[in-house]
Image: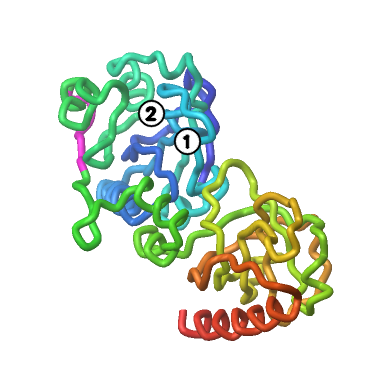
Amino acid sequence: MQIIKVKHPLQAEQVPIEDTVLIMGFFDGVHLGHQKVIRTGVELAKKHNLQSALLTFDRSPRTVYQHEKDFKYLSTMERKAELVKDLGVDRLYFVEFTEEFAQLKPQEFVDQYMIDLKAKYVVAGFDYTYGKKDIANMQTLPQYAHQKFEVVTVPEQVINGRKIGSSAIKQFIIKDKVEEANKFLGYTYQNQGTVVHGLQRGRTLGYPTANLITKGDQVIPSIGVYATRIKIDGTWYNSMTSVGYNVTFKENTGITIETNIFDFNADIYGKSVALEWVKYLRGEVKFDGADGLVKQLELDKLNSIAVLQNN
């Protein structure tokens, strides 16, 4: 898959040589609803012997249009690219969502980013917009297309009557329901980050931990202890992870992500890792001292192993 980063306007050398099926959306998290849209586009491209191209943005439009601060993402750009590649897309366009780009009128956007990308089909979800939603939606898109391309709208996708959406998934993750989030995602939620030095308290308790600093503005699961897996140098290891404040020892560290990796003792400081959140086990508990904490950690490890063996 070719990745093209676009700073408005689109440059001539960034235009594909062949006609395309253009897949549109922000696709934060590339959840099951997004996957339906992307697969529809990829299959259509194969059927008509066209290139599949996906156009997305480097940040949420809400951070520009609504000036939303502290917006949290389900996927970094790198993670999004990884998930899109797995779905068989040929070309991935990341457009820098600037104030200038945001000023494009619907017809200008269609002309410069659909027609100019040689789209013969444009595929998007039912709620996709490219400007003010009352005039720039999937129902009005054929008017702007001027018969240059066909519009394919993918209907709402649901699980148990609930729309599969990034907002719902975020709420699951921050409210102790990571398993529900994983059902809606269609895979196990991950954070990407770097291992840094911590207080090394776990080492003295017999449960050394890798402290993770996440990249960018990723959604972090709620406070508690989780059964997890961690990817180091291309290999996955079973683990358990605490998201918390170190309340037992009253250490003013802020929220930390600390992972105890089972059967592992290598030095991984400074390494980039991925952490999968498999199951929420319990909330954060304040113990009277180290003994009570160690007993709970022993139980957490047993529970994590049982979860990971069955997952």
Label 1 Cα crowd, 10 Å radius (few <14 / some 14-19 / many 20+): some
Q: Where is residue 87 shown, x and y percent of the image?
A: 41, 55
152 magenta-colored? yes
Nearer-the-camera pick, 187 or 23: 187
Element type where label 2 sits in the image: loop
Dividing the picture into quadrants, the one containing residue 19 is: top left
| Residue at x-position 57% and y-position 47% | 78
Please report the bounds of the magenta region as a residue range: 147-153
Nearer-the-camera pick, 302 or 87: 302
| Residue at x-position 16% and y-position 30% | 139
Identify residue type, mark 2.
Leu
Left or right: 252, with 82 as reference point: right
Q: Where is residue 295 shown, x and y percent of the image?
A: 67, 83
Can residue 43 be seen by looking at this rendering? no
Q: CA distance from mark 2 to mark 1?
A: 10 Å
Q: Earlier in the sequence, mark 2 or mark 1?
A: 1
Do the residues bearing badges 2 and 1 touch, measured as CB atoms within 8 Å?
Answer: yes
